[in-house]
Image (tube, coloured by chain):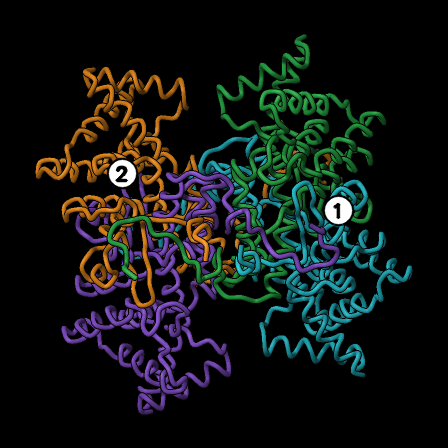
Chain colours: A orange, B purple, C cyan, D green
Amino acid sequence: MSNDVSDWWSTSIIDMAPGQIRMRGHPIQDLIGNVTFPQMVWLMTRGDLPSDDQARLLECALVAAVDHGPQAPSIAAARMAVTCGLGLNGAMANAVNMLDDVHGGAGEQAVELFGWIDEAEQAGQPLDEATATMIDRWQADRSKFIPGFGHRFHKPEDPRAPRLLGLVDEAAQAGTVSGRFAHIGRAMQHCLNARKGKPVPMNIDGATAVIYAELGFSGPLARGLFCLSRSVGAMAHAWEQMQQGGRNKGPTPPAYRWTYTGENPIED
Amino acid sequence: MSNDVSDWWSTSIIDMAPGQIRMRGHPIQDLIGNVTFPQMVWLMTRGDLPSDDQARLLECALVAAVDHGPQAPSIAAARMAVTCGLGLNGAMANAVNMLDDVHGGAGEQAVELFGWIDEAEQAGQPLDEATATMIDRWQADRSKFIPGFGHRFHKPEDPRAPRLLGLVDEAAQAGTVSGRFAHIGRAMQHCLNARKGKPVPMNIDGATAVIYAELGFSGPLARGLFCLSRSVGAMAHAWEQMQQGGRNKGPTPPAYRWTYTGENPIED
Amino acid sequence: MSNDVSDWWSTSIIDMAPGQIRMRGHPIQDLIGNVTFPQMVWLMTRGDLPSDDQARLLECALVAAVDHGPQAPSIAAARMAVTCGLGLNGAMANAVNMLDDVHGGAGEQAVELFGWIDEAEQAGQPLDEATATMIDRWQADRSKFIPGFGHRFHKPEDPRAPRLLGLVDEAAQAGTVSGRFAHIGRAMQHCLNARKGKPVPMNIDGATAVIYAELGFSGPLARGLFCLSRSVGAMAHAWEQMQQGGRNKGPTPPAYRWTYTGENPIED
Amino acid sequence: MSNDVSDWWSTSIIDMAPGQIRMRGHPIQDLIGNVTFPQMVWLMTRGDLPSDDQARLLECALVAAVDHGPQAPSIAAARMAVTCGLGLNGAMANAVNMLDDVHGGAGEQAVELFGWIDEAEQAGQPLDEATATMIDRWQADRSKFIPGFGHRFHKPEDPRAPRLLGLVDEAAQAGTVSGRFAHIGRAMQHCLNARKGKPVPMNIDGATAVIYAELGFSGPLARGLFCLSRSVGAMAHAWEQMQQGGRNKGPTPPAYRWTYTGENPIED
């Protein structure tokens, strides 16, 4: 057999032989029962095993983002999907697919923006100045939306953010992480509040991005980890909907219908 | 505002008010940092918090099934997806969508079949007899494929199965679970080996289904939990593929192409 | 190069060589500009080219099912998807994925049930008797829901059904189709109305299933063709939503939220 | 009932009342049997009905792109999906989801780049100069990949491109379209060949983008129309795979497996 076929898909993640499976070089039977799920997530995506303290901080982020209710498009899609006949796999797939740039990309973007600020600070700029400069640069180059901040519902603050930042502080004091991305997050909060003249609360994407950045995850993985976390909520809601029943359940009660704005409407 | 609109989507999973989020009645800030990810999965899908021992057994199943390499259609789909331009959300969605009845349904089916055997045993039939009867009934009513057993690659045994069963035994001895589904799984193994005259190894779906049944998860959730677990592998492989690069990567090296079996072939 | 790799994916649909593409044996450049899209759909799925009259009847079914408004879960999913950041491909994928057994399977099921009735009639049973018998058998063996009939909104009739049946009648008179599935559809309508004591209107799935059965498409393709047709509506709505804007648009106006039915609710 | 709920989803595409459906103001029964599928696609996405000649040119593009064989990730995903247990809806969804920026975005990008060149030409720049300038600008601002040109397989030319361009020429002579985007496409071809010193064949994305631009479709719809077209191939291949059977079919023959590149490999 020629190597070009087996080489077509190459990976450093998993090796197999009949009766044997190794993940990142570890026999699977040594991992099962000995590492936690967050440690496994870290091992699979990064190649090494985290310390217990690192894994616990990662776990906090994964726990925090599982759900935000059935008005989130991801959760709504999962619930509608089961009323269309899909199993939990299809419902979860439809939910996770929704977590694109707008619904699921803010964490990835926040990690990137935090990185810009961190780099400027490491290059000698004071934190507040670096923060202001990089927020300006983000809005000029990328988007008027500052990733990780602002919430249309949770005002004045998202209850997940201070809790997660507090846990980062504890981890920093214990030497698990440096704590400098928590500083960056708070500097951004301060800057944005001042600019707006009102609270622009750090949201779940911002708070989890602080953790992911502290732990050294790259931006795209921040999105992937959010997808993993929100999959729990999608599964729970899809399963609840399955038990509630319902067939072809649309977004709003059928009696309301929608507003037609085009030509030649049907007269009542 | 009329209640019919808010009633259209009702849930016992999550409640919210500005600045407040409760999951199954627990303020989110009390859960973050205090419950593990597997505990959160249990809480979200079932409504109550499991004991630490129950959560640890669940965690073993979630860790065991994260990946089976790039020849699994789910993982292949995730890797191909990123070469088509999708982000990790799209790659994970394509992977999880693949976990339908054949690729992801065996765990769900195994929980159901275990339940049949359990019921027959509880009704007084000896275990071996109940097992043989219900395997026959499954093949008559459902499919010739017995869910949870047989592997085209891992012979004579899938390394994950004995490890997981051993952990169930430990949990049974500790009183965390009853252990009767481990007995059922082994009875099925014995019966199938005898019928085939060769090992028909319990596979990952069978072994995790033992755990899910022991912990009281219903069949559909066995599928959902597998989707959650395999999402980790999909994320890891998609991320690795993203770093490898590649554009529009098809299943096999391009030089091989495919075999055309129709009319009027192109002559060389 | 060994054949086993190219044989792994074999197809009678398409053959290629550098600078050459043949679909079902026809050079692509001979098809482009010479066959209609519905003819191409037929050629690809069945291998032969339909007559112009057959293709026109197929086209009627494809035109009829493109959309049923934003309360259909498929269309809602497409619109929500673009507000989450997905492109038209992702929006269309989420929509089409929704067309599972409940939302998109009725056409497939109707083709199958029509086939049962047709077989009984061909075996000598009078049409009305065959119809009644097979409706009973469907409800006993499959589901209380009779596929292709009943509509919660279009009463007393779905405007698409009589139009499509009229076109089948014309095609039957012209000798394009036999017309016997239109008879079957009407016999079912008659039987169901009598049983319910009120109109149980043939819906779009029933009416298009008549056409697909008349043209000899098998059940699963009836679902596939519906997916193709509805993709047009998904694309149009997703594109309209993209122009309207909106970010993370949930199913209902945010002010309504949802009804929490679980323990320990947040007090106002 | 308050209007805010019905206003939450507003559309100019479809209006409904019991027994009535209007698409863009046209009663559905007047469209069925009277407009072709491509006309319906145009009506739904743009609001007006095209002439027969415009619709025929659109049809050529839709026919041309239906399939490129099972090595295209979209088609491979559709075939793998059915071996995992998905129906045609899930298979088609997985295929269409794959048509993201790299696999399905070139048409959208080509329409945009053609537009840049057109604008420069309309502003007075000679075509060849406008073409060279805008290709440079694309590579500087967007990507080194020029959308719509280059093929790793079809050399020296993709058989679909000259056929489609010839049909645009005919349509231009008949006054159906202006023909100026065909000029732009050929100018790009000329420029790229000269720069590379070898043929850089216009591919299916480039050729269909010429048609979409000639007909006035915006870029995102070029992607959507490709998704619609390729859905036909996905359906045909998924259906063929369903008939072939196969369970959990991975990308390559199982015996080849993959190449493990990580630490601590399993020794043979």
Q: As rendered, which of C117 and A6 lies closer to the eye?
A: A6
D127 to A56, vertically: above or below: above
Q: In the image, what residue occupies the spot 41% across and 23% down?
A: A142
Q: Quick one: SS at disc 2?
A: loop
Of all chains, the one bearing label 2 is A
Q: Quick one: SS at disc 1?
A: strand
Q: In the image, what residue occupies the spot 31% across and 68% down?
A: A19
Residue C268 marker: none
Mark 1: few, some, or many residues within 10 Å (few <14, many ≥20)?
some
D10 to D97, vertically: above or below: above
Which residue, as the protein is rendered here, is positioned at the far left? A174
Q: In the image, what residue occupies the spot 21% across and 55% down?
A: A36
Q: Quadrant of the N terminus of chain B?
A: top left
Residue of label 2: A217
Q: As rendered, which of A116 and A92 lies closer to the eye?
A: A116
Label count reads 2
Amino acid carrying mark 1 in the image: Pro
Q: Position of residue D142 (x, y in %)?
A: 49, 24
Amino acid carrying mark 2 in the image: Phe
